[in-house]
Amino acid sequence: MSKTIIANWKMNLSVKESILLGAKVAKIKTENDIIICPDFLSLSEIKSKIKENNIYLGAQNCAAYSPGSYTGEVLAKSISEIGASYVIIGHSERRKFQKESNTLINNKIKQALQAGLKVILCIGENNIEKKNDKTNFVLNVQLKEALKDLEKTDLARISIAYEPVWAIGSGRTPKIEELNTISTFIKSFIYSSYQKRVKVFYGGSVNANNAGDFLETKTINGLLIGGASLNYPEFSKICKKNYDR
Ligand code: PGA
């Protein structure tokens, strides 16, 4: 079974830099699916470079509103029109720096789904929550509130990225057993609430050395990669691995 490898470039690259990297990533030949998530301004140009049918485009965010007077916001429908098929919603950096709440995230998901996009919903506990044994509690609240009022059919277009905040950009990662328990918890939560099987991705300090371990974990369907996705040789190495063991 192929896995999904998501490149989250965040705000690390300018448009010119994104297009250069995008042109290379767009040519990677692999059994796995790749989703390239550059900044909004690079989406259109990178879309034109993608020739492989298992390479997709995703945005890193979308507005929580229907068309209207929201200066500076980006409409989910525009993201879809430009040729992106995915959007990352609820990344911990947006929860932290833009103070995004689960309610806002819920509205963004609804807008994205209405626009025909597929959603990669990010959830994860911070260091203090982990130390206080609150991981399951936090994930439960994030899932319940972010997915509020959604229908079973909506869940067909949602995947969950488990990204412990303490692991992002820190070089620290969860133990495989821990990760397995948590991804099983997420899948069971969704199955018992919506009778749907969701894909669960892992994100946080993934690199070419540890990617194989995560991907060999049966309950992990893919990876959301920040830092290592900016390094073409490293990223293509991760994408090209065959994890069917
Ligand atoms: P990282 O970021 O791979 O640099 O830790 C992952 C993410 O924030 O999506």
Image (spheres, rainbow, N blue to C red):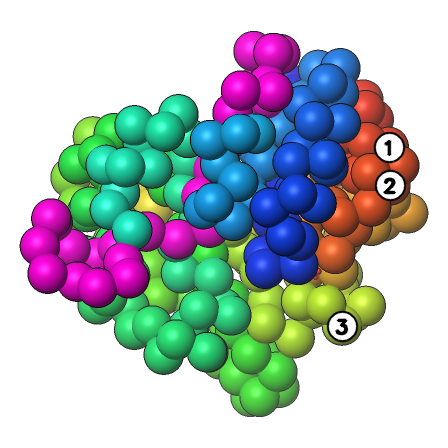
The kind of residue tagged 3 is Ser
In three-dimensional space, the C-alpha distance between marks 1 and 2, rounded to whole angstroms, equals 5 Å
Q: Secondary structure at mark 2?
A: helix
Q: Position of residue 39 (x, y in %)?
A: 52, 49
The kind of residue tagged 1 is Lys
- Queried whether the magenta region covers residue 13, the answer comes back as no
Look at 39% across and 53% down and name the residue there.
61
The residue that label 2 is drawn on is 234
Q: Which mark is residue 237?
A: 1
- Queried whether the magenta region covers residue 69, the answer comes back as yes
Q: Which mark is residue 170?
A: 3
Q: Main secondary structure of the magenta part?
A: loop
Q: Position of residue 229 (x, y in %)?
A: 73, 46
Q: Is residue 178 left or right of residue 107?
A: right
Q: Secondary structure at mark 1?
A: helix
The kind of residue tagged 2 is Glu
Assign the C terminus to one quadrant of the image: top right
Q: Nearer the viewer, residue 66 or 127?
A: 66
- Whether tag 3 and tag 2 are in contact, CB under 8 A, the answer is no
The residue carrying mark 3 has its beta carbon less than 8 Å from ligand 1? yes
Position of residue 224 relative to residue 5, above or below, is: below
Residue range of the region highlighted in magenta in the rendering: 47-73
Pointer 2 local density, CA inside 10 Å: few below 14, some 14–19, many at least 20: some
Question: Can residue 220 be seen from the camera position used here?
Answer: no
